Image: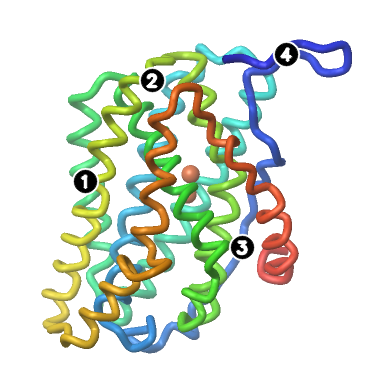
Amino acid sequence: MHAQATASQPATLSRSRIPILPRRPKWSFADLKQRFFFGGNSLKSAFIVALSGSFPPGEKEFIQSVRLFMNQVRDPKLISDVQAFIAQEGQHSLQHRLLNEAFDRLGYAATLISEQFEVIEEDWARERSDADRLAVTVVMEHITAVMAHFALTRPEEFDPLPESLRELLLWHAIEEIEHKSVAFDVYEECVGDRNLLRRWLLQQMILFPLGTREFQRMLLTKLGAKPTWKERAEMARYLFGPGGLIVSVLPHYLALLKPGFHPWDVDDSQLVEEWKDHLQAALS
Ligand SMILES: [Fe+2]
Ligand SMILES: [Fe+2]
């Protein structure tokens, strides 16, 4: 479903609503001192480390899968969106690698987990068609944008975190929303098979949380940490309690199944504007 040309606005395949601005923030992570930095909870802390460990290889695959189709994209606006998307994802990957090294200094095997996931990703990509790889990127970009929306609308969840980590996660959330339709618009132009997207969504909705939980378990095993029942209850509440992460994001994941869905059906442009103001100092 492509945009129509008007006298004032030429036809474009890009349906991005807001500017996609690559930024180069800097954090020293000097305030990341406590091993269990997320309110003293080992499970919640390892959950964040597991996510951070998965980002650099995940984002590398997002970039590569979109690049596979670049020679088929003709629309100048969509080409410039893709360039900005690649610049943002490359910077996310870099910042999470630096964060993972800070986690390593606290005793986590974050970089090791990341390297192991990279091998898994490369093996997976080698056996898949270009269309499958882009479809999974579209699905993961959708999942990430929904999680980013949750992060920006429930920022109090991150209050217990050290400031640098909190800022990094909110910066990542802003940029995920800015570029949330880029891979989708490339897919619409070059592949367009909605059923393929639906199949991969149903798989990734299961595989992504299971994979994150396995990384979380591996990280804590390597630390020799045994979560208490209180920590387990807090983790369960964080994910499944009223307003919890999983119960909040699941219905929005399913929106991708609807005929005619587009990521900007959810217009969170104002939300991004507000957070750009809040984080102005950290991002300038
Ligand atoms: Fe990212
Ligand atoms: Fe992304």
Indicate which label's residue lies in the foreground, 2 or 1: 2
Indicate if the residue with disc 2 has its beta carbon within 8 Å of ligand 2. no
Mark 3 secondary-structure assignment = loop
Q: Amino acid at mark 4?
A: Ala
Q: Earlier in the sequence, mark 3 or mark 1?
A: 3
Q: Residue furthest front?
A: 242
> Along the horizontal axis of the image, is 192 left or right of 83?
left
In front: 101, or 144? 144
Q: Earlier in the sequence, mark 4 or mark 3?
A: 4
Q: Are marks 2 and 1 in contact (CB under 8 Å)?
A: no
Q: Residue drawn 23% across and 50% down?
A: 117
Q: How crowded is the residue under tag 4: few (<14 C-alpha within 10 Å), some, or many (20+)? A: some
Q: How crowded is the residue under tag 1: few (<14 C-alpha within 10 Å), some, or many (20+)? A: few
In front: 275, or 37? 275
Badge number at residue 11: 4
Assign the N terminus to one quadrant of the image: top right
Indicate if the residue with disc 4 has its beta carbon within 8 Å of ligand 2. no
Q: Which residue is mark 3?
A: 25
The CA span between labels 4 and 2 is 22 Å
